[in-house]
Amino acid sequence: MAETKETTVMGKLVSLAKRRGFVYQSSEIYGGTGSVWDYGPLGVELKRNLRERWWRAMVHQRDDIEGLDAAILMHPRVWEASGHVAGFTDPLVECRNCHRRFRADAPELAGGQCPVCGSRDSFTEPRMFNLMFRTFMGPVEDEAATVYLRPETAQGIYVNFLNVFNASRQKIPFGIAQIGKAFRNEITPGNFIFRTREFEQAEMQYFVEPGTDEQWLEYWKDQRMTWVRDLGIRAENLRFHEHTQEELAHYAKRAYDIQYRFEFGWQEFEGIHNRTDFDLSRHQEYSGKKLEYFDQASQRRYVPYIIETSAGIDRTLLVVLADAYHEEDVEGETRVVLRLNPALAPIKAAVFPLVRKDGMPEIAEKIHATLRAAALPSFYDDGGSIGRRYRRQDEAGTPWCVTVDGQSTQDGTVTIRDRDSLSQIRVPAERIVAWVTEQATKPYAPLPAIP
Ligand code: ATP
């Protein structure tokens, strides 16, 4: 992963993520596992906040979408019906010199030179490689016992379409949403948590009447871009990319990616796809079970079309981190700050007694306890200078630091320092919970990038 030198934002993010406990390499003490990552104390909170925000917008705040949590292991026929056994393959080439493998279409191979060892014309002919992880169910390891780790969560939704429909009494159009792990044996993983072999997806499949699919695709395209913008991602770093005929997946009639401008180029982190009736028709064919919908009003029976919104939680988290990462000069020193939307920030407020005496710790501890009791994650820090304590919280993305000083013991007010503007205000200590709650739930407008 040549890009992750400390001179690049990605390199700096990797080291900040480790230093502050956002993301670690999996099994690091054994030298790490290829492109699998673990989330530390701050990372797990950020990820939960992202997931919960998605769930709230896609399930809780809507009448027309139901939630689901399907298992990772599914009947092997699912993957025949979905086309993954036959088609979920990438052309793979190997360098005869260093034996590293690459996707044949990787841009760095364009010159015919191996990007690892530099050999020229050393690549084998492309060979198709299935990206699904295979394992065995039960004690006998044979073909009949082969199962796959799901490469996408969507199929769990399709096979449960009738179950959810019958239990929820929804009418078309309606959707089913789920968040869960997916696995792909990627040939060229990399760029930190951008492309990994184990990752999480947040997918929603919206079942619509054929003929209304184009209009629903446009609707979901807008909804999803609005959601992404509301995370606090700067508009100039976001765009849609419509799939060309060559890019369209076998199941798709039309598809858009939401792309982010990473320093390694514009890259997809969410897809909005018109999957037509491909999935339900195939499952009907392979399972022998009818997956049709009967529309009472029109007395029409049909296999619904599906509009899918498919986001990677880890990849979206990387977008959030990359967009929030800033270095700026403050009084001659470099300040590293994660300008996270407060609603996503792992710690909402840090509480500092200015000194460890004169009644300040008692007031600070009480504020810290009150914040926690109100389910606002708070961090208590009484170590080192205030400047150092601010810097630690800036790197963690904590939006507000509350300091208890001499005046607090006199008049019961404390200072709140704002991470982004660096401004300070005095607020009565008993107002802190209300103040933080109000600020953390406001829409967040990101500051423009520092040139
Ligand atoms: P790519 O072209 O980058 O391989 P894809 O087009 O195969 O992605 P989809 O199958 O549409 O991706 O998956 C939907 C989302 O799931 C992606 O936008 C991404 O956020 C996430 N995703 C897919 N593969 C990975 C991976 N290997 N690591 C992390 N996230 C992934």
Image: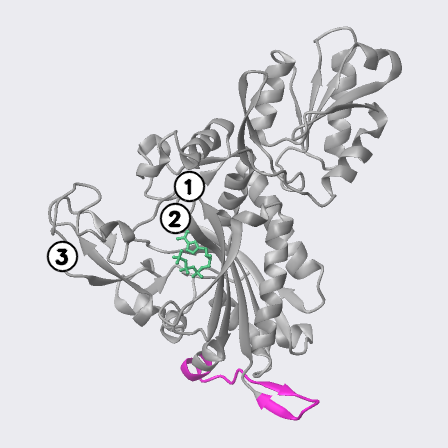
From the viewer's perspective, is 337 left or right of 127? right
**Residue at 72%, 37% in the rendered image:** 375
Q: Amino acid at mark 2?
A: Thr
**Circle on res. 37:** 1
Secondary structure at badge 2 equals loop
Residue tagged by mark 3? 124
The span picked out in magenta is 283-301
The crowd level at tag 2 (other Cα within 10 Å; few <14, some 14-19, many 20+) is: many
The nearer-to-camera label among 3 and 1 is 3
The crowd level at tag 3 (other Cα within 10 Å; few <14, some 14-19, many 20+) is: some
Q: Are marks 2 and 1 in contact (CB under 8 Å)?
A: yes
First-in-chain label (3 vs 1): 1
- Marks 2/1: CA–CA distance: 8 Å
Secondary structure at badge 1 equals strand
Residue 33 in the image: state x and y as whole percent.
33, 41
**Residue at 80%, 33% in the rendered image:** 435
The nearer-to-camera label among 2 and 3 is 3
Note whether 20 is above or below 275 in the view shown: above
Residue tagged by mark 2? 196
Q: Name the one closer to the observer, 47 or 190.
A: 190
Q: Amino acid at mark 1?
A: Trp
Q: Amino acid at mark 3?
A: Thr
Residue 159 in the image: state x and y as whole percent.
50, 73
**Circle on res. 157:** none
First-in-chain label (2 vs 3): 3
- Marks 2/3: CA–CA distance: 25 Å
Note whether 194 is above or below 389 in the view shown: below
Asked whether mark 2 lies closer than 8 Å to ligand 1, one says yes
- Residue 285 colored magenta? yes
Residue 211 in the image: state x and y as whole percent.
57, 83
Q: Residue furthest front?
A: 451
- Marks 3/1: CA–CA distance: 31 Å
